[in-house]
Image: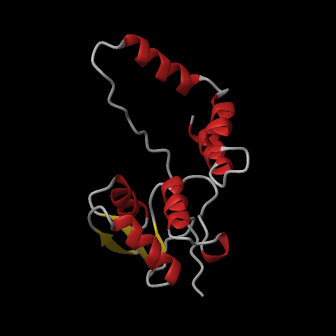
Amino acid sequence: MLSVNPSGFLQDVTIGVLSGSITQQFIAGRYQLANQRIYEGITGRESGVKDAASGTIDAFASDGMLLVGEALRQGLTPSQYSVIPEQPLTCISYGMILPAGDTEWKETVNNFIRNQSSTNLLEKVLGRNSPFLPMSVADQDKCI
């Protein structure tokens, strides 16, 4: 069984990525010795997770939360996959489109992002026993 160490060079490791994604660019730059397998279209993540879980590829790189969600959607159990590393590989900033001129909504979003009590909201929204909660809180702590 191949061990994927994200701190290494990943020489001869096949990593799946979504075509045209920021992740594709990041993997190409950070793991230049790895082999990329490009997944296209709206079913790309679904196929990539399936291939990684079955061992067709060594790993599939994407947003950790979306990977876990896709694994759950496919009925995979945590014994059938791992998300590594525990902290995100990168803290790529995402943006949101808001209605023009809606300063109240813009300020609400900005306050939420700045407010450390967002952990409490994550727990409310995701549920105390959600498999997504630990990952969400850890990502937030590392990236904010």
| 60 lies above or below 139 | below
| 79 lies above or below 93 | below
Q: Residue at x 34, y 61 (%)?
A: 24
Residue 78: image quadrant is bottom right
Q: Position of residue 41 (x, y in %)?
A: 26, 63
Residue 104 in view: yes
The residue furthest right is 128
| 33 lies above or below 96 | below
Q: Position of residue 20 (x, y in %)?
A: 26, 58
| 128 lies above or below 69 | above
Q: Nearer the viewer, residue 106 or 4?
A: 106
Residue 16: image quadrant is bottom left
Q: Residue at x 44, y 59 (%)?
A: 62
Q: Residue at x 64, y 57 (%)?
A: 86
Q: Position of residue 112 (x, y in %)?
A: 55, 24
Left or right: 3 in relation to 36:
right
Q: Nearer the viewer, residue 90 or 47?
A: 47
Residue 11 in view: no
In the rendered view of the protein, which quadrant contains the C terminus? top right
Q: Residue at x 60, y 45 (%)?
A: 139
Q: Position of residue 92 (x, y in %)?
A: 44, 44
Left or right: 110 in relation to 103:
right
**Number of numbered discs on residues:** 0
In the rendered view of the protein, which quadrant contains the N terminus? bottom right
Q: Nearer the viewer, residue 108 or 126?
A: 126
